[in-house]
Each structure stands twice: as structure tokens, then as C-alpha cells.
């Protein structure tokens, strides 16, 4: 089940617009509360809650930098640092597909230091070395496992969120609105995961995701509006539609795969849901690599420029 997959666990942990933006900005070198306020546009009280939650969950750690009054830097822990593939994939997607806006805090170009090239992040299979294409990956339920995903998604847990605000409704950096809306939400990335696995029809989404109909309809509409998904009529009387990812949607694959990997490593090492590449019968193991030299992307090896400097 997609909703019990490692990626789904990762999405539930990070699945919030503000947490998502905090992670992005932490990788751009930001550590201070006021910097996060400035770059994410989050209300201060909301940001406090998100920083506390990310700290409790082990993604960030506090480091005091001032005693009177007490002030902390928020720095990525090893668990947080391990989201680097995710951050790079999101930046790249934004550079490729996001709105082109001046004054952005998102890097405007990524270059790989090892080969000197402006690269694409590519997800490769560690068994056969080939780039992993969505259609070559199957998922299997390895064992019956009752993860209480429904409760986490549907109850009043702090990570639950209503429909994200539209462009223009959120202060701060406009450049990441699309990615934050698409990924900083619990349902849309699960829908994208389902689409990547070849699920196309409304009743199949319902069966897989167990989403309420209004949530499902709302998120599908959002994905169509964002140009991530297109709707195609497959039946006339009555008219019925199926949904397919556009190029922009398929390009979210490295983002979802990075979340899947991170979820496997840190949240559900014994996940009942496994991905399998067509090359082997063992569970799929992947890495995000540079499209030119095929070396795994490491934080110190990727250079970028940002228009809004770190203080
Ligand atoms: Zn393979
Ligand atoms: Zn390279």
C-alpha cells in the first residue's frame, strides 16, 4: 500500500509547507529563527512549532549561540543532512519547472564540482546502475503490516493540514510555492507516487490511498492546475477521466525516490512495502547521482548561486 510506504512515512513527518521550506533553507545554510521567518514567510508562532517538531523528530538540533537572552541555531542532524538528495532534487525541479521569479532564495543553477557540469539529479539502481524509470519499478507488500497510516492522515494530528494557500496568499519567497504546495502536503505526493506506479483512475486512487473523496478531488484538481497531471477522458457515457503525469510530474520522481530512501533509512527500516527494479528480485536500492559523471551527489560537491544571500 502506498500509504504505508517509506515515502509516505517521510511525507507524514515532513508533510507540511513550513517544515518543507525550513528543510530547504537549512540546506542553503540558514540556521537562525529570524532567517527562517524571512525566507519562508511563516508566521512566527507557526515557525516556532515547526522548528520544535523538527527538533523533536531528530531532523534538526538546537545549538545555543547566545546566552542573554538565550538564542539557538537550528542545525541539521545526521538524519536531517541525509535529506540532501531530497533538497537537491527539489531545487532542480524548481529550477526546471517552477515560476521564474526575481529575488528568489532558491538556487538558480546547480553545478557539480567533480565534473564541473550543470547537471540533472538522476535516480539510479545500485544493482544494475541504470537510471530508474517509473515504469520499470513495481512495488510489493512484503508482509501484512498494519501501520496506522489512516489515523495519522485523517485525524487531528499536528501535521494535518487543510488545502494549501494559493499563490499570492503566502508571504515570503514566491519561487517555492509550487514545490511547497505539491510536496509540502500529505496527499499530493502520495497521489504523485500512485501515478508514478501506474495508477490512473479515481476509484483506484481511492482504493490505494483511502482518501476522502473531497480531499482526493481537491488534490487532483490542484495537480491538474499546477500542470503536473493531465486529465484524459477514457469513456463518453457517462464521461470518465483518467489521470496521467506530465513531464513536469514525472520529473518529481527523484524527489519521491529520495523521500522513499530516507524513509527506509530513518523511519521504517522494516517497511512492509518494497520497491523492485526489473533487473533483480531483491528490493530496489537507489542513489541520486550526477547526470554527467554518475557520482552520487554530496553536499560539498554541489555549488549553486542564490540571489538572496545568507546573512
Ligand atoms: Zn536495476
Ligand atoms: Zn558530475
Image (spheres, helix red, strand yellow):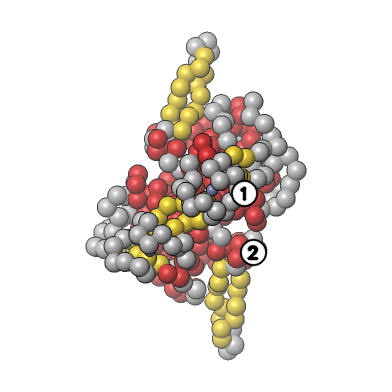
Answer few, some or many: residues within 10 Å of disc 1's Cα (few below 14, many 20 plus, some between 14 and 19). Answer: some
- Which quarter of the rendering shows the C terminus? top right
- The residue most toward the top is 68
- The residue most toward the left is 143
Q: Are marks 1 and 2 in contact (CB under 8 Å)?
A: no
Could you tell me if residue 12 is visible in this image? no
- The residue most toward the right is 102
Q: Is residue 25 left or right of residue 262?
A: right
Answer few, some or many: residues within 10 Å of disc 2's Cα (few below 14, many 20 plus, some between 14 and 19). Answer: some
Could you tell me if residue 296 is visible in this image? yes
Q: Is residue 208 left or right of residue 50?
A: left
Q: What residue is disc 1 on?
A: 118
Return the x and y of residue 294 as percentages of the image width and height. Answer: 48, 52
Q: What residue is disc 2 on?
A: 227
Q: In the picture shown, does residue 63 fall above or below 102?
A: above
Q: What residue appears at the point 51 percent right and 17 percent down from the top-left corner? A: 65
Return the x and y of residue 257 as percentages of the image width and height. Answer: 45, 56
Return the x and y of residue 102 as percentages of the image width and height. Answer: 75, 43
Amino acid at each position: 500500500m502506498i500509504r504505508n510506504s517509506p515515502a509516505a512515512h517521510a511525507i507524514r513527518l515532513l508533510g507540511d509547507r513550513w517544515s518543507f521550506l525550513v528543510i530547504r533553507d537549512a540546506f542553503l545554510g540558514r540556521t537562525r529563527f529570524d532567517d527562517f521567518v524571512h525566507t519562508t514567510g511563516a508566521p512566527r508562532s507557526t515557525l516556532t512549532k515547526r522548528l520544535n517538531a523538527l527538533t523533536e523528530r531528530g531532523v534538526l538540533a538546537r545549538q545555543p549561540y547566545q546566552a542573554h537572552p538565550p538564542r539557538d541555531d537550528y542545525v541539521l542532524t545526521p538524519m536531517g543532512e541525509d535529506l540532501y538528495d531530497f533538497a537537491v532534487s527539489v531545487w532542480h525541479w524548481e529550477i526546471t519547472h517552477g515560476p521564474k521569479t526575481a529575488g528568489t532564495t532558491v538556487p538558480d543553477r546547480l553545478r557539480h564540482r567533480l565534473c564541473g557540469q550543470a547537471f540533472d539529479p538522476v535516480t539510479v539502481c545500485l544493482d544494475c546502475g541504470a537510471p530508474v524509470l517509473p515504469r520499470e519499478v513495481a512495488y510489493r507488500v512484503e508482509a501484512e503490516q498494519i501501520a496506522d497510516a489512516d489515523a495519522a492522515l485523517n485525524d487531528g494530528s499536528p501535521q494535518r493540514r487543510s488545502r494549501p494557500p494559493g499563490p499570492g496568499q503566502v508571504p515570503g519567497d514566491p519561487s517555492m510555492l509550487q514545490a511547497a504546495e505539491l510536496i509540502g502536503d500529505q496527499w499530493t505526493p502520495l497521489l504523485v507516487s500512485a501515478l508514478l506506479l501506474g495508477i490512473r483512475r479515481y476509484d483506484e486512487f481511492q482504493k490505494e490511498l483511502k482518501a476522502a473523496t473531497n480531499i482526493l478531488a481537491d488534490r487532483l484538481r490542484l495537480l491538474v492546475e499546477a500542470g503536473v497531471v493531465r486529465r484524459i477522458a477514457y469513456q463518453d457515457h457517462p464521461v470518465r477521466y483518467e489521470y496521467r503525469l506530465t513531464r513536469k510530474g514525472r520529473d518529481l520522481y527523484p524527489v519521491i525516490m529520495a523521500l522513499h530512501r530516507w524513509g527506509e533509512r530513518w523511519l521504517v527500516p522494516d517497511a512492509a512495502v518494497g520497491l523492485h527494479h526489473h533487473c533483480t528480485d531483491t528490493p530496489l536500492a537507489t542513489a541520486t547521482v550526477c547526470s554527467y559523471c554518475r557520482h552520487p551527489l554530496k553536499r560539498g560537491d554541489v555549488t549553486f548561486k542564490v540571489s538572496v544571500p545568507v546573512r
